[in-house]
Amino acid sequence: MSAEASKRHQWQWENATAGAAAGFATVAVMHPLDVVRTRFQVNDGRVSHLPSYKNTAHAVFTIARSEGLRGLYAGFLPGVLGSTISWGLYFFFYDKAKQRYARNREGKLSPGLHLASAAEAGGLVSLCTNPVWLVKTRLQLQTPLHQTRPYSGIYDAFRTIMREEGFSALYRGIVPGLFLVSHGAIQFTAYEELRKVIVDFKCKRSTVHNQNPDKLLNSVDYAVLGATSKLAAILLTYPFQVMRARLQQRPSGDGVPRYMDTWHVVKETARFEGIRGYYRGITANLLKNAPASSITFIVYENVLKLLKPTIRND
């Protein structure tokens, strides 16, 4: 393996490690809001086993009072597993795609190629992690009002789903999940382009010439970039999250899913709830994901800074 190829291989693992660390930190801090968001998303006013919440604060208080800390952290293990794997794979695939596209372009990528890189990474991650997200959703929706025997944990959930519904059930919600690839594409494109604007602005104001762009940015910059890019992505793609959550609900006692496929979700939601139905739980989602994205990119960029010198000196 050439020195250049070896360096490129090491760089990819730097990104994967930084992404995994960022994903774990994000889930650990924000998981209770994720539980609230999921319960709002599937509550179409016709679900009997879900409590009724007035707003996000009421939901957090009600879950804490009736279900305790365990309720607020329902689905935490698959959430940590899925997010850590997802972010690790996402940054790995994303950086690998950027390197491939940049080979014949002197290292410079257009917004369109950033978009293509992010979309490619998102599609691969979605296919790898959909079963984990399905289990997380089902564990989060288990409440004291649930009529079906609850899953005792992540292993029992996988085993029960495979036994009762078959392997294909692990990929319920994959269609809106693949559409959600656009979420990452929008977020990363916005992040990269806004990052360029801030770096250019700071370069013009800096008295040091030819300074490394990484040294011009700090944690506050990463927080602003992460939150802003995430906000744009959420507003444009949130309905796909609602569709996926509704498709991933556990079937009732008769074994019949509440929603048969993506088009069924679209029709039923439009018929009974209108546009508002596609944005159920968005307040909790914004409260969770705007700061969560800031945390993710602060951790990612700073872990990357720590890893770069270490690998270069080996």
Image (cartoon, rainbow, N blue to C red):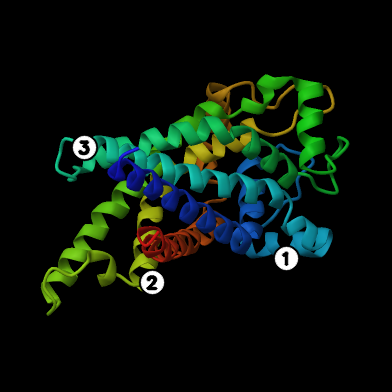
Q: Badges 3 and 1: C-beta atoms under 8 Å apart?
A: no
Tell me which label, 1 or 2, sits earlier in the chain.
1
Q: Secondary structure at mark 2?
A: helix
Q: Secondary structure at mark 1?
A: helix
At horizontal 82% and vertical 36% (from top left) the residue drawn is 156
**Disc 2 crowd, CA 10 A, few/some/many (<14, 14-19, 20+):** some
Instruction: Provide residue 299's location: percent of width, then percent of height.
Output: 47, 64
Q: Secondary structure at mark 3?
A: loop
At horizontal 55% and vertical 39% (from top left) the residue drawn is 242
**Residue farthest bottom in this picture:** 207
Q: CA distance from mark 3 to mark 1?
A: 53 Å
Report the front residue among 35 and 87. Answer: 87
Tell me which label, 3 or 2, sits earlier in the chain.
3
**In this figure, which residue is indicated by the disc labeled 3?**
103
- Three-letter code for the amino acid on which mark 1 is drawn: Phe
Instruction: Provide residue 190's location: percent of width, then percent of height.
Output: 30, 51
Position of residue 252 relative to residue 224, above or below, is: above
**In this figure, which residue is indicated by the disc labeled 2?**
219
Position of residue 277 relative to residue 292, above or below, is: above
Q: In screen coordinates, is 13 left or right of 33?
A: left
